[in-house]
Every structure is written in structure tokens, then in C-alpha cells.
Image: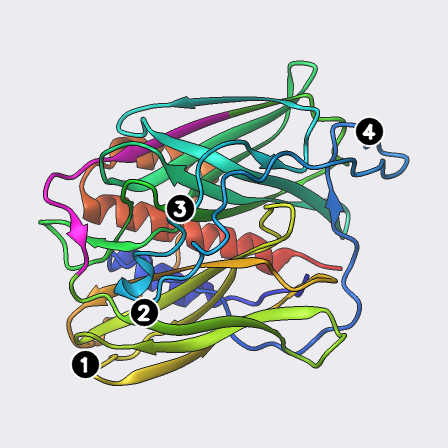
Amino acid sequence: MQQRRFGLGLAMGLALSGCGSDDSSGANGPAGPPGQMVEVDAGGLGTGGFGATGGFGATGGFGATGGFGATGGGGSGGTGGGSGGLASNLPNANVSQSTVGDGAGVVLISSKLTYEPSGSQYYQTWTGLVQNNGASIVCFVELNVSFKNGGVEEASFLAFADAPPYQTSSSSLSAPCLGPGQIGGFFSNGFANTAMPNITQVDVTIGGQIYPGSVPHPSAPIISTVSSFEKYGAGTGYWAAHGTVLAAADVHNVGMDVYPVDAQGLVPDRLGDFHLEAFYKNTSWSFETNTYEDTQAPGQLHEFLSFIDGAFMMLPPQAPQTYSFEELRQMATAARTPKALAQVRALWRARRDQLAARRTR
């Protein structure tokens, strides 16, 4: 997995202006062999070595052709397939899912927990997919997860799902929302002082917001092409996504998030690129994401756009602020309007990117 480098000050400026666009860096060259990323398995990981990764859960939650949103800025992406089964790299752990607020109907369909040595600590990631099996449009889907061993919490994460862009009645920002049947992706991370022990229990709580009148955003750029490729040549194993986006209206601060899905239905990483300047109607943008390492090409891609409606306006620089994930959880609980939730989500993304930048091999 390639290390990312992020512009935290830029991310915080976007957050304080109410923008939830992506802040991941674009094209980085390969930085030598990455450190080992361990796929945590309930069958046995101790501090003395790595246990076998075992088998994988069912992959019934993924449609074979539902990965690409060719129109509507990704709004139609990932609607194929049912919700049967959870793809997980913890096949022996008991998984409990519950919902709060307007999250009813949204379910976790893919979950992958990994960690790797990073200096004197361990860098952890939690990636996956959610699907809206309900009848309502659910926005700002929030996930809180606790990974436990024998009742003792070993890791916890906060995540906001990336999703197709919708328009609410009170904001010029695109809101990440899941219509009935649609799929969203998430990526969260953190650091721990010790290696991950066996995981026997996973408790997931999913929340969200329903805003009456929400519709697929009419200004959403159109993703005309998207595909994966080996960025540094065949056989190198560094996979990225590239493609073309067409502007359907004047927008700015466009962020692209791409979630590759492997043959087991698991998400190995989150890829991203961004177009911060004005993106004028009837123009195009050729994007190319950062990379992740794998021996096989992804079987599917789920891609999502975020943006601010209208032409670009220069904003004054904002002083960076740092919040803990627990503070962000409390802020998310208190936030209810699309603008407030967009600000919390952007602050969370900036915090997540800051942690990723700390990772060493």
C-alpha cells in the first residue's frame, strides 16, 4: 500500500468553509517495498507473530455490474446485487449491527480490518461498504465500530460513508446520500501501541439523516469513464484508477473517491483525486488517483464525487484545527443540518488524512 501525503491546512480550510471534498494526494511515485499490511483474522494474531488469514465471508452483497456510475456523478454506481451476506476478513468473529436515528435500512456489507507496524506503533485501517436496503434516501451515513476480544475493546473507529451526491434544500454543498439499493464506501484509520490480538466480536452502529426533498444533485459532474490500471507498469502490483469527468454545471472543489473491491468482496484501500479550481460546464477533467498494492486487479470499483455548486470563490486561509475522533463523534451527534454535518465530515476526513500522513514503513 502506497503512503499518501496530504495537505492538512488545505483540508481544514475546506472543512471550515463547509466543504467535504477529498484531500488525498494524487500521483505519487512508488516509494520502495511497502511494509507488511496484516489482515487481522479471528483465528489467531498475537504479539509474537501473524496467524493465518483464514477464509472470507460471503460476497452476496455485490452486484457483478453495479460498480460504475456512468451518469449522475456516480449516483447510479453500485446499485446492483443484493444484501445477502457480509464480506469480512474476520470470518470467525460475531458481528452485531444496529442502527440509530435515520440509519434504519442501511447495512454493512463489507468489512476489512488491517494493521501494520509503523515506527513504535501499529497503523490500523478499517475499510468497507454499506448498502441502503430501506425505502428512504439516507444522507451522511455514519458508522461507529468496536472490535473486541473476550469483551475487551481492542480498536474502535468512526467513519462517514462516501456516497452519490444529492441536493438538499438548504445547502450549496453536495450531500453524500444513499438512495434505495445504493452502495457507499468508507475508510477510517488510527494508531495503536500494541499488536492486534484475536478479534471475537464486532459491534457496528450505523446512523444517518433523512432530509425530505433530497434528490440526486442536478449539478453533479458526469463520470464518463473509469477503470483500474497498474500505474507503474504491468507486474508492479501498484493499482490506481483513472478516468474522465464531464461538468454538467459550474462547480468547484470537486473530490473523487474510488473504492476498489477485490475478489473476496473486500475493500483494500480508498483512492482519491481532486479538482479544487472552478470546473466549468461542458469542460472535462481527467483524474488519476494514488495507488494501493495488490497482486490482482480489483474486481469492481465504486466511485463517488463531492463538490460545491457554483463557480470558484477564493476563500481566506483558515488556521488548522485538530479534533480527536471522540470529539468528532460528539460533534456529529449534535449536528443535524446538511452544512453542519458537512463540516464535521470534512474535519473527520482531515483528521483521517493527518493520521495517514504519520504512517511510516
Q: In this view, which residue lies farthest toward the right?
A: 48
Regarding mark 1 in the picture, which secondary structure is present there?
Answer: loop
- Which one is in front in this view, the residue at disc 3 or the one at disc 2? 3
Label ID, residue 183: 3
Question: In this view of the protein, which residue sits in the foreground, 150 or 180?
Answer: 180
- Secondary structure of the residue carrying tag 2 is strand
- Nearer the observer: mark 1 or 3; the answer is 3
Image location of residue 291, percent across then percent down: 61, 68
Q: Position of residue 55 (x, y in %)?
A: 75, 36
Residue range corresponding to the magenta coloring: 204-217
Q: Earlier in the sequence, mark 3 or mark 2?
A: 3
Name which of mark 4 and mark 1 comes first in the sequence: 4
SS category of the residue bearing label 4: loop
Q: Which residue is mark 2?
A: 254
Q: Residues within 10 Å of mark 3 (few under 14, many from 20)?
A: many
Cα separation between marks 1 and 2: 13 Å
